[in-house]
Image (cartoon, coloured by chain):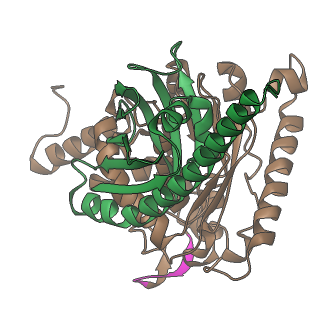
Chain colours: A green, B brown
């Protein structure tokens, strides 16, 4: 199953990137998330690993994921190492006038699960899609707030007011 | 072959069946098959989510990096749906790669089809040695001290913890030096109308001596109607199952270097009863939850 959701935000790709690249932010905007933990010494970047759990139906699903693409400020992609087989991607593209389009892609599957596996993929997709949409709404709010904060800081600096 | 063993087709058949049952009851930790579990998870998830509307709370109370003895209340007759739901939740939370074993009655393990599935999912026949073996290997082990006595209690006692005074799990935790994590569930006793344990009937038929069965339960269950023994299982009603995992109890830290089993037993059963009362208070209707 492959699910793709996107949103337009009033912030340049650099602001979106710096927000998404910080693992500490994920608990603030990922919907349904119950656990997000950096595993190992590397907090982000290519090869960084996280243990993620998201509540879907009767279970908290997820597992260990590893960042397999880290192209600043455009793409972050990960693959599952253990847990439910899945891969995901943040795709950030400039849309002019200081705006960006954020695409959130998630693909998952249950190899060997037979008909139950296919039914589960389909049944879970409704919850997963809803959570992805809510995640993007929350991400948009957070990123635009961050952008307004940065712009206010620049205005203060241009007036010679010391940084807050 | 011994010269004095009886010969003939019947004798050989008996020997074959005896050998197969004995093989099935021999626990091998490596019988657990993570790939089998991974492939079984979708079906378990569908049933747990849509049929039983299951909810498993506070799995984070299970230490992630050491073996523990998970002690649960047993419900649902011979179709123990809460065990399957807990196994699903455990496997998705920690990953199928983390070893996890449950203990079950000999009869369940020896069953031709279901027994094989149980062994692949990490179930071993209930014995102190099997549990010790798994704990020594670093795996969490789930036990049901109440066993057949508790799982066949009448439906109107579904909100009661009844371990029948069995304290073997305390010795097991002390010997292995592992904490106890209580696991409390509700709803299993609403998957059929359990009427009686039939303890007197089991004794009269000497089932306790022949099959280690202290009960011969009587229930009203699908598809049989009147169901005596529940040997072939039943189709569970879609009762809402809620499971709560309590914080770990380090026996030596809480009860001193030589804990008194009676005191520990009272403490753990009281704690579990308190949690079960809370879960029962959340329910509005039988089966619906």
Q: Is residue B8 magenta?
A: no
Where is residue B95 drawn, in percent x and y?
44, 36
Image: B72 above or below B27: below
Image: A48 above or below A99: above
Image: B257 above or below B289: above
Left or right: residue B108 versus residue A58 is left
Q: Magenta residues?
A: B217-224
List the single residue furthest toward the front.
Answer: A159
List the single residue furthest toward the left.
Answer: B9
Where is residue B64 drawn, in percent x and y?
59, 28
Along the line of sight, the residue nearer the viewer: B43 or B255: B43
Image: B166 above or below B276: above
Along the line of sight, the residue nearer the viewer: A10 or B29: A10
Quadrant housing the N terminus of chain B = top left
Q: Is residue B206 visible?
A: no
Quadrant housing the C terminus of chain B = bottom right
Along the line of sight, the residue nearer the viewer: A103 or A127: A103
């Amino acid at each position: 199953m492959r699910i793709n959701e996107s949103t337009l935000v009033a912030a340049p790709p650099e602001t979106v990137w710096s927000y998404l690249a910080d693992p500490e932010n994920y608990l603030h905007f990922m919907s349904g998330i119950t656990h997000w933990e950096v595993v190992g010494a590397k907090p982000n970047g290519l090869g960084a690993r996280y243990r993620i759990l998201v509540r879907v139906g009767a279970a908290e699903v997820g597992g260990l994921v590893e960042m397999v693409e880290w192209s600043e400020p455009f793409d972050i992609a990960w693959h599952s190492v253990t847990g439910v087989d899945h891969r995901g991607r943040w795709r950030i593209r400039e849309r002019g006038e200081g705006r960006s389009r954020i695409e959130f892609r998630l693909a998952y599957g249950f190899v060997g699960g037979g008909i139950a596996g296919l039914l589960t993929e389909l049944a879970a997709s409704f919850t997963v899609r809803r959570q992805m949409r809510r995640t993007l709404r929350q991400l948009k709010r957070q990123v635009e707030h961050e952008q307004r904060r940065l712009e206010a800081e620049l205005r203060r600096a241009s007036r010679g007011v010391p940084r807050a | 072959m011994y010269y004095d063993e009886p010969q003939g087709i019947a004798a050989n058949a008996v020997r074959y069946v005896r050998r197969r049952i004995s093989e099935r009851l021999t626990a091998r930790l490596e019988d657990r098959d993570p790939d089998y579990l991974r492939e079984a998870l979708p079906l378990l998830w569908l049933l747990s989510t849509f049929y039983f509307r299951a909810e498993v709370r506070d799995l984070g109370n299970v230490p992630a990096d050491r073996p523990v003895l998970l002690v649960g209340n047993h419900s649902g007759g011979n179709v123990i749906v809460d065990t399957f739901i807990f196994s699903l939740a455990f496997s998705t939370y920690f990953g199928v790669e983390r070893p996890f074993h449950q203990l079950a009655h000999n009869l369940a393990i020896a069953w031709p089809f279901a027994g094989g599935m149980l062994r692949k999912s990490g179930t071993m026949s209930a014995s102190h040695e099997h549990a010790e073996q798994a704990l020594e290997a670093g795996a969490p082990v789930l036990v049901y001290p109440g066993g057949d006595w508790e799982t066949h209690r009448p439906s109107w006692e579904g909100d009661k913890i009844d371990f029948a005074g069995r304290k073997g799990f305390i010795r097991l935790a002390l010997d292995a030096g592992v904490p106890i994590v209580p696991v409390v569930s509700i709803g299993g006793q609403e998957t059929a109308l359990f009427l009686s344990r039939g303890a007197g009937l089991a004794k009269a038929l000497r089932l306790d001596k022949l099959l280690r069965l202290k009960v011969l339960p009587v229930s009203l269950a699908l598809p049989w109607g009147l169901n005596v023994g529940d040997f072939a299982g039943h189709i569970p009603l879609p009762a809402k199952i809620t499971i709560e995992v309590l914080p770990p109890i380090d026996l030596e830290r809480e009860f001193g270097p030589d804990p008194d089993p009676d005191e520990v037993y009272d403490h753990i059963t009281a704690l579990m009863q308190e949690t079960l009362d809370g879960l029962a208070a959340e329910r509005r209707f039988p089966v619906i939850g």
